[in-house]
Image (spheres, grey):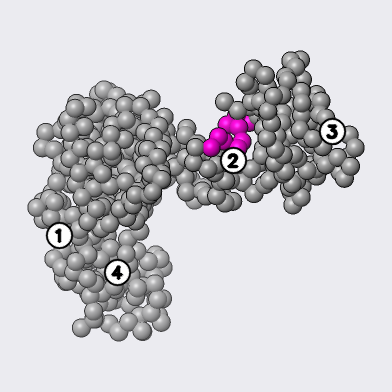
């Protein structure tokens, strides 16, 4: 007996046989137009001729099937409806359906070209079992005007084959071989030439291949055939690659009666915040990237992302940030006929050890700053809040650069900080380009005594310096002179940051002065 795939892994394959035509029928219904009972076909160019690429059920019943030339179809049924093939429209629809199906499990992917594949092993208990989940999904999709056939099995290959080439339904664990035995060899989805060769050899059904030695089959028909056969029979499986990043932690709430009021949404999000933060705390983790997903009753899904400056696992601050994010949206959340499910996810966990108190109390200031950044980012968007990080340069105008405040970019090293309670060594306001000033000094390499800036004369009553800054010799450019910076105060109490450009006698004999910033 050959080994079988894990019984705990269960896949739900969904196939939409009339995806293209269902899309057009749905559009017609939503526009309020009268339904047209004439058969509908989608045409596109194939093999240098217009051919049918998709048909609705009414067209299929009278022989207007994909592959038929358009001229032949028009001769048979002159009154048929015709539309151009729109693969982009079909792809957009399947993406929207996949967004909607995320309510059943986040582990899902699009199964090209017209289906979905869901791994439901970890979520069936939320719906009362496989049969209940299967029935709920099928009923909702049919209500949305989508024809489908679906199947549940233990491997992706067997679930897809049962949905597309079989009757659908639920295959009990480890019964894939028996369930797929009657399927045609087309269910292997190998090259048409291989299917023809199999039939010529008398092998028309999966059962005709199942008990044959695999090595001779691979030698005659190719290794791809035996690989696909093993998947259909439940012997091997490949894990599903989800279409979206799987959250590290999540909590969700379903509603028998859809909700739409902001107060109800807030109450649900508070409960979900407590649930999610409890899960994070049990693992000693905190979340820095969160996502709130709102599933509308009509199938529309709205997602909001949220970033935090430090690992977060307290429910009240998380809930407050989410509500600020919602209230700050320029495109408000539209509940439509209400939300029947809300999910809150921590997209990634990060170690969040208890905060230890420091002698200088700086941890409180850091926590307050992080909370302020989180609130501003929630209100105005993460990209609207920036911070400065050290750059790989000496000169002040290149010594730092702005990055999003919630990013992990560290910069070239730590900032030089003044002593506790000491005034800042450099101004908070820095000119993007230093501005030339006229300076009078007692000696060429001494501090300034008075200077004229913007036609105003300033008498210097106090000065500190110089702070000598070497040029950035490793960077391209002509700026190769040393700067001596002075913090000066004039007679009316204004404080400035001036520098002398070039060492007198060593780098230049023509000393020039500039103002680079002002102190508050």
Pointer 4 residue? 237
- Is label 2 in a helix, a strand or a loop? strand
Pointer 3 residue? 443
**Crowding at label 2, few (<14), some or many (≥20) Cα neighbours within 10 Å?**
some
In the rendered image, residue 460 lying in the magenta stretch gets the answer no
- Which of 189/355 is in front? 355
At which x and y percent is residue 394?
Answer: 68, 45
Disc 4 + disc 1, Cβ < 8 Å: no
Earlier sequence position, callout 1 versus callout 2: 1
What mark, if any, has residue 429 been given in the picture?
none
Earlier sequence position, callout 1 versus callout 3: 1
Earlier sequence position, callout 4 versus callout 3: 4
Q: Which residues are magenta?
A: 422-432
Earlier sequence position, callout 4 versus callout 1: 1
Q: Distance between the Cα atoms at labels 1 and 2?
A: 58 Å
Q: Distance between the Cα atoms at labels 4 and 1?
A: 17 Å
On screen, residue 370 versus residue 520, left or right, reads: left
Dominant SS in magenta: loop
Q: Distance between the Cα atoms at labels 1 and 3?
A: 94 Å
At which x and y percent is residue 288?
Answer: 36, 47
Pointer 1 residue? 170
Earlier sequence position, callout 2 versus callout 3: 2
- Which of 154/127 is in front? 127
In the rendered image, residue 427 lying in the magenta stretch gets the answer yes
At which x and y percent is residue 32?
Answer: 26, 22
Image: 49 above or below 5: above
Pointer 2 residue? 401
**Crowding at label 3, few (<14), some or many (≥20) Cα neighbours within 10 Å?**
few
């Amino acid at each position: 007996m050959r080994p079988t795939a894990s019984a705990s892994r269960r896949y739900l394959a969904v196939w939409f046989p009339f995806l293209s035509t269902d899309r057009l029928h749905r559009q017609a219904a939503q526009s309020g137009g009268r339904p047209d009972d004439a058969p509908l076909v989608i045409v596109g160019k194939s093999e240098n001729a217009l051919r049918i690429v998709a048909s609705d059920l009414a067209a299929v019943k009278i022989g207007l099937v994909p592959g038929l030339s358009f001229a032949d179809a028009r001769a048979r049924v002159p009154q048929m409806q015709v539309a151009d093939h729109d693969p982009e429209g079909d792809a957009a629809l399947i993406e929207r359906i996949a967004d909607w199906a995320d309510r059943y499990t986040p582990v899902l992917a699009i199964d090209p070209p017209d289906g979905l594949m869901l791994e439901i092993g970890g979520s069936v208990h939320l719906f009362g079992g496989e049969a209940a989940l299967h029935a709920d999904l099928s009923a909702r999709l049919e209500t949305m005007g989508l024809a489908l056939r679906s199947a549940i099995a233990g491997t992706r290959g067997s679930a897809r084959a049962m949905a597309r080439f079989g009757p659908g339904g639920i295959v009990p664990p480890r019964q894939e071989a028996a369930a797929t035995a009657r399927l045609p060899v087309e269910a292997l989805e190998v090259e048409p030439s291989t299917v023809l060769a199999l039939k010529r050899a008398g092998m028309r059904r999966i059962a005709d291949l199942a008990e044959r030695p695999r090595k001779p089959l691979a030698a005659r028909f190719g290794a791809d055939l035996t690989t696909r056969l093993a998947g259909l029979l439940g012997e091997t499986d490949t894990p599903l690659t989800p279409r979206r990043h799987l959250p590290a932690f999540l909590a969700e709430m379903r509603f028998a009666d859809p909700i739409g009021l902001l107060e109800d949404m807030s109450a649900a999000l508070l409960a979900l915040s407590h649930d999610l933060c409890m899960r994070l705390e049990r693992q000693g983790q905190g979340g820095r990237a969160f996502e709130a997903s709102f599933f509308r009753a009509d199938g529309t899904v709205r997602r909001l992302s949220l970033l935090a400056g430090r690992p977060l696992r307290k429910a009240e601050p998380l809930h407050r940030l989410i509500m600020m994010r919602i209230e700050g949206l320029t495109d408000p959340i539209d509940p439509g006929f209400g939300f029947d499910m809300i999910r809150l996810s921590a997209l990634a966990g990060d170690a969040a050890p208890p905060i230890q108190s420091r002698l200088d109390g700086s941890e409180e200031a850091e926590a307050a700053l992080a909370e302020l950044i989180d609130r501003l980012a929630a209100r105005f968007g993460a990209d609207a809040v920036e911070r400065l990080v050290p750059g790989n340069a000496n000169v002040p105008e290149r010594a730092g650069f702005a990055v999003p405040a919630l990013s992990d970019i560290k910069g070239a090293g730590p900032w030089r900080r003044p002593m506790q309670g000491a005034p800042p060594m450099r101004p908070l306001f820095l000119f993007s380009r230093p501005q030339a000033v006229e300076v009078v000094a007692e000696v060429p390499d001494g501090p300034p005594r008075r200077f004229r800036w913007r036609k105003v004369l300033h008498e210097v009553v106090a000065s500190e310096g110089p702070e000598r800054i070497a040029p950035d010799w490793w960077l391209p450019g002509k700026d190769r002179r040393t700067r001596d910076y002075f913090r000066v105060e004039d007679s009316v109490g204004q404080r400035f940051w001036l520098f002398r450009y070039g060492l007198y006698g060593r780098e230049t004999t023509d000393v020039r002065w500039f103002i680079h910033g002002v102190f508050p």
